[in-house]
Image: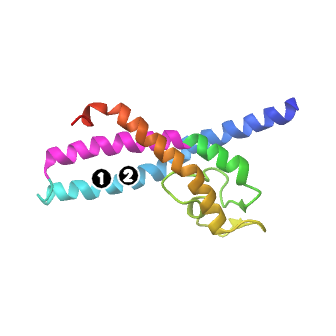
Amino acid sequence: MVFVMSDLFLRAAFETFWYFALGALPTAIAGSSLLALLWSGVLAEKVDAAKASLLTKRFLVFGATLFILGAPANMAFTLLLRGRLYVPDDPFVDFLPWLPASASALGLGSRGHYLDAGSSVLLNACWLVLALPVWGAALATYRRLLKHEWQW
C-alpha cells in the first residue's frame, strides 16, 4: 500500500512539474497572440492605449490565475484517464483549461490515439467536467485579486 501511494504521489508530482514547465509555453503563445491583436488596434488608433493597458493587466492576471489553478485538474485528468481512455502523443501535458482535451491530450503527432473505451466526445466531456470548476475558481480568484476594479 505504501509503495502504491508513493508511486501515485510521484506520478502526480511528475505531471504537475511538466504542466508548469511545458504547459506555460502554449499558454504564453496563445495569450501573446491575443494581446498582439489588442495592441495592433492601439497602433491603428482604433483602441485607446489606457483601455488597452487596463485590458492587458486584467488578461495577464486572469490568464496566470487560470493556468495555475489548472494544475490540479491536469493532475486528475492524467492520473484518472491516461491509459484508460487514450494514449497521448507526448506524455507531458494532457490538460490545459483553455484547450479542449481531444486537441491537447492526443497531440498533433500520429502516435496519440483513443483506447477501446475512449472517444473524442467522452474525452471532451471529461475535460469539461474538470475545466468548468477551474474556470469558476479562476473567476472567483480573479475577482478577489482585482476587487477594487469590481466596485460600482
Identified at 22% across, 42% down, the residue is: 54
For the stretch drawn in magenta, what is the main secondary structure?
helix
Alpha carbon separation for disc pair 2 and 1: 6 Å
Q: Amino acid at mark 2?
A: Gly
Q: Which residues are magenta?
A: 48-70
Identified at 15% across, 55% down, the residue is: 47
Pointer 1 local density, CA inside 10 Å: few below 14, some 14–19, many at least 20:
some
Identified at 53% across, 46% down, the residue is: 133
Left or right of 21, for residue 41: left
Q: Which residue is mark 2?
A: 31
Screen quadrant of the C terminus = top left
In the image, residue 128 lies at what x, y percent?
Answer: 56, 56
Residue 111 belongs to magenta span = no
In the image, residue 71 lies at what x, y percent?
Answer: 57, 41
Q: Which residue is mark 1?
A: 35
Picture quarter containing residue 121?
A: bottom right
Pointer 2 local density, CA inside 10 Å: few below 14, some 14–19, many at least 20:
some
Q: Are marks 2 and 1 in contact (CB under 8 Å)?
A: yes
Identified at 62% across, 53% down, the residue is: 94
Q: Secondary structure at mark 1?
A: helix
Picture quarter containing residue 76?
A: top right
In the image, residue 96 lies at what x, y percent?
Answer: 54, 51
Q: Secondary structure at mark 2?
A: helix
In the image, residue 80 lies at what x, y percent?
Answer: 72, 49
Residue 101 visible, this angle: yes
Residue 106 visible, this angle: no
Q: Tell how many labels.
A: 2
Q: Amino acid at mark 1?
A: Leu
Residue 62 belongs to magenta span = yes
